[in-house]
Image (spheres, helix red, strand yellow):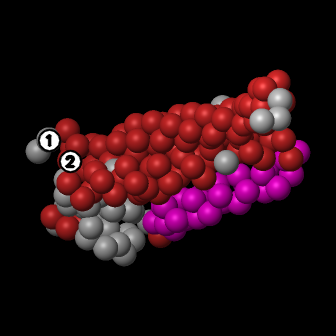
Amino acid sequence: MDLNQHLFLLINSCHVNGFTVGLARFFAEVPIYLSAALLVGNWLLARPQERGPALAIPCAAVILIVMHTLIRHHWYHPRPFAIGMGCAFLTHDPNSSFPSNHLGIIFACATAAVLLPRFRQVAIAVFVLCLPIAWSRIFAGVHWPYDMFGAIVTGGISGLLGHAVVRAVIARRQQAPRQAARVAARVRQRGPH
């Protein structure tokens, strides 16, 4: 048994009460919607000049989905229940488990958001939700501990890339009027032909 399986069996237990299973189901499914609602709500309350940079948050999610799709396309890793390990408390397709999309999307969005002053406090709250989400997805038998580690790494990278892409686009858009004014000034200097 490797470390990933050993850690999984420490977290996933077939001898649990209904409350623990209910708690795991809650954290496995609800926080992704709660995180999205917090971030969208904060975006709606933001001043107009804060909304452009906030596009880094959905940009990070898109980058993460592309990254995960490529990883899963080239490397299949079975879910614990697919190989008969532990107990599964959630129904899930037996697709590749690595990395976790639930945790990855939340971590990517929180990473992009924490870099924006307006969203920093909400992002920290979303980061705090990542721990029970990771626990619940493993406890529920649909992910391995390494899937969570992979989601944190890919989520962090996606969040940073989403932030960088949006900053570059905003900088480019801010330069465009200045460039147009310089071109117009050169044309005026040359005079009519």
Q: Amino acid at mark 1?
A: Asp
**From what the image shows, is residue 110 above or below residue 89?**
above
Residue 34 point in image, percent of width and height = 66, 59
Q: Is residue 34 magenta?
A: yes
Q: Amino acid at mark 2?
A: Gln
Q: Nearer the viewer, residue 6 or 48?
A: 48
Q: Residue at x 78, y 51 (%)?
A: 43
**Number of residues whose C-alpha sits closer than 10 Å to that of mark 1, classed few (under 14), some (14–19) or many (20 or more):** few
Q: Residue at x 71, y 52 (%)?
A: 39
Residue 5, label in figure: 2
Q: Nearer the viewer, residue 56 or 42?
A: 56
Secondary structure of residue under mark 2: helix
Q: Residue at x 35, y 72 (%)?
A: 92
Q: CA distance from mark 2 to mark 1?
A: 5 Å
Q: Nearer the viewer, residue 127 or 24?
A: 127
Label 1 sits on residue: 2
Give the magenta-colored segment's residue range.
Answer: 20-47
